[in-house]
Image (cartoon, grey):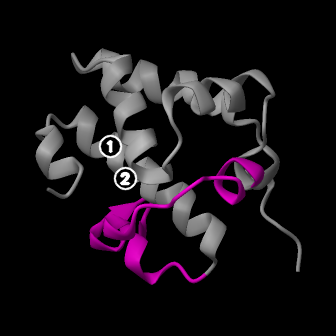
Amino acid sequence: MNNPKIYTMSFSKVYPLYITKAEKKGRTKAEVDEIIRWLTGYSQEELEAQLEKQSDLETFFAEAPQLNSSRALIKGVICGVRVEDIEEPTMKEIRYLDKLIDELAKGKAMDKILRK
């Protein structure tokens, strides 16, 4: 099976887009980083190392130290697709992150975004 093109995109190319989306709505880079760390288990230093080595999205999620078990609580539609219905694991992780950044940009409280 051919992997979608998004898997080969560098996380360092997508990351600034997440920050821009958040900042346009009055949110911060620190909040974006917190969401990414919560979802993936990366420390801030590990996150910055991934950005520096320009890992593709597939590698970024494959090397995540500890994917948060609460991520299964992330529900809803992103890019016209219901997140909980996505079968392919890597695509599901990418869409989880997209959904969390969307929630941030929509003004949702961090406690709710991080499923506390």
Which residue lies under the disc numbered 2? 99
Element under disc 2? helix
Q: Which mark is residue 80?
A: none
At horizontal 41% and vertical 61% (from top left) the residue drawn is 68
Q: Amino acid at mark 1?
A: Asp
Position of residue 113 measured from the top left corner of the image (x, y, whole percent): 21, 49
| Disc 1 crowd, CA 10 A, few/some/many (<14, 14-19, 20+) | some
Q: Amino acid at mark 2?
A: Lys
Q: Which residues are magenta?
A: 59-87
Position of residue 8 measured from the top left corner of the image (x, y, whole percent): 82, 48
Position of residue 76 measured from the top left corner of the image (x, y, whole percent): 29, 67
In this view, the residue farthest toward the right is 2
Residue nearest the viewer, comparing 19 with 25 = 19
At horizontal 62% and vertical 23% (from top left) the residue drawn is 48
Which residue lies under the disc numbered 1? 102
* Residue 10 in magenta stretch: no
Position above or below: 50 against 30:
below
Residue 71 position by quadrant: bottom left
From the viewer's perspective, tell me whether residue 53 is left or right of residue 18: right
Q: Quadrant of the N terminus?
A: bottom right
* Residue 78 in magenta stretch: yes
Position of residue 28 measured from the top left corner of the image (x, y, whole percent): 30, 17
Position above or below: 104 against 92:
above
The residues tagged by marks 2 and 1 sit, at their Cα atoms, a distance apart of 5 Å
Element under disc 1? helix
From the viewer's perspective, tell me whether residue 7 is left or right of residue 19: right
At horizontal 50% and vertical 51% (from top left) the residue drawn is 40
Residue nearest the viewer, comparing 54 with 16 = 54
Q: Are marks 2 and 1 in contact (CB under 8 Å)?
A: yes
